[in-house]
Image (spheres, grey):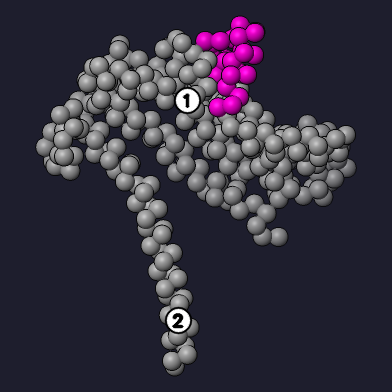
């Protein structure tokens, strides 16, 4: 009996330690979101006081109206730009990444592994390092301060190509492709009608990663754009926050705008969670 209790004691201690660490991580993640929700419902005076938890000074709807009225409704334009950059860019980028990963997995060509090694090396390069070369390239072809200067670079994601190859190995059996070839299917038809359907969970996973990265993209638009009508939400809120040091009336709209900026990512993860979770377990069980 004592031996059994002694064996359970370290196990329970270990479980308690793990639960404590998880609880701290959850608090660390959720407390800023809770502060953002509470602050978005307060007026400017309450933001600089300790009254965030009180029921007074409720200004949620007033702040919401101010966000879309500030600077002639510029926030709506920024929000639309972010949706265009992120949703369309993530969809096209995911398709490109999955196609490249599929090619690396299923086809043989010269220097295949060396090229894939370059893809893996590109994963480790920070995006901020590439901003200046991308700016010089865009300047050379006259794309600076245009929609395409931000949209084109986000279509290519080395990490997405790596994930595409992993998903292709785990989801697309070679036997199925051989059967499709015997039935007379061409390579493009075989990819779009057979392989791409099997790669659905992987496609959604890459899409979500791309969506999050593009939606939060800040440095590239800041380097490429000077026209505020082309700004995404992240850069627009930064501009308003910089103005708030001189004009304090910007503080409530920055907080409310930040809260609204989080909602599309939350909705995307909730709506696509089933595909995303199944995609992350690709190849885990054979």
Q: Could you say which disc has been placed on residue 218 in the image?
A: 1
Residue 142 falls inside the magenta stretch: yes
Q: Position of residue 244 (x, y in %)?
A: 27, 20
Q: Which residue is drawn at 44% across and 64% down?
A: 18
Q: Mark number for residue 8?
A: 2
Question: Crowdedness of circle 2 by 10 Å Cα count: few (<14), some, many (20+)?
Answer: few
Residue 250 % position (x, y): 26, 21
Crowding near pointer 1: few (<14 within 10 Å), some, many (20+)? some
15, 166: nearer the viewer: 15
State the image quarter where residue 57 is shown.
top left
* x 15%, y 39%: residue: 51
Residue drawn at x 50%, y 46% as measured from the top left: 273
Mark 1: secondary structure? loop
Q: Extreme left residue here?
A: 56
* Residue 249 % position (x, y): 22, 20
Classify the position of the N terminus by image quarter.
bottom left
Measured from the top left, where is residue 77 in percent x and y? 40, 16
* Part of the protein shown in magenta: 128-152
Along the horizontal axis of the image, is 108 left or right of 169? right
Residue 123 location, quadrant: top right
Main SS, magenta region, reads helix
Q: Mark 1 and mark 2 in contact (Cβ < 8 Å)?
A: no
Residue 145 sits inside the magenta stretch: yes
Left or right of residue 200: residue 228: left
Answer yes or no: is residue 157 visible.
Answer: yes
Q: Earlier in the sequence, mark 2 or mark 1?
A: 2
Secondary-structure class at tag 2: helix
């Amino acid at each position: 009996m004592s031996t059994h209790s002694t064996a359970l004691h370290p196990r329970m201690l270990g479980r308690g330690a793990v639960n404590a660490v998880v609880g701290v991580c959850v608090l660390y993640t959720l407390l800023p979101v809770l502060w953002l929700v509470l602050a978005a419902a307060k007026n400017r005076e309450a933001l600089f006081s300790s009254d965030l938890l009180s029921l007074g000074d409720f200004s949620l709807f007033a702040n919401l109206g101010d966000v879309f009225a500030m600077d002639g409704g510029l926030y709506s334009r920024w929000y639309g730009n972010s949706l265009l950059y992120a949703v369309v860019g993530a969809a096209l980028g995911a398709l490109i990444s999955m196609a490249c990963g599929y090619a690396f997995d299923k086809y043989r060509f010269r220097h295949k592994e060396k090229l894939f090694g370059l893809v893996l090396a590109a994963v480790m390069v920070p995006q901020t390092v590439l901003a200046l070369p991308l700016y010089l390239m865009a300047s050379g072809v006259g794309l600076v301060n245009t929609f395409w200067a931000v949209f084109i670079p986000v279509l290519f994601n080395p990490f997405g190509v790596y994930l595409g190859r992993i998903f292709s190995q785990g989801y697309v059996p070679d036997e199925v492709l051989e059967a499709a070839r015997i039935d007379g299917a061409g390579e493009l038809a075989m990819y779009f009608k057979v392989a791409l359907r099997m790669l659905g969970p992987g496609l959604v996973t890459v899409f979500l990663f791309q969506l999050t990265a593009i939606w939060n993209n800040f440095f590239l638009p800041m380097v490429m754009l000077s026209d505020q009508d082309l700004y995404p939400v992240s850069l627009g809120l930064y501009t308003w926050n910089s103005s708030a040091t001189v004009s304090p009336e910007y503080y409530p709209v920055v907080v409310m705008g930040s809260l609204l900026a989080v909602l599309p990512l939350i909705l995307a993860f909730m709506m696509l969670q089933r595909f995303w979770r199944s995609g992350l377990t690709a190849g885990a069980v054979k």
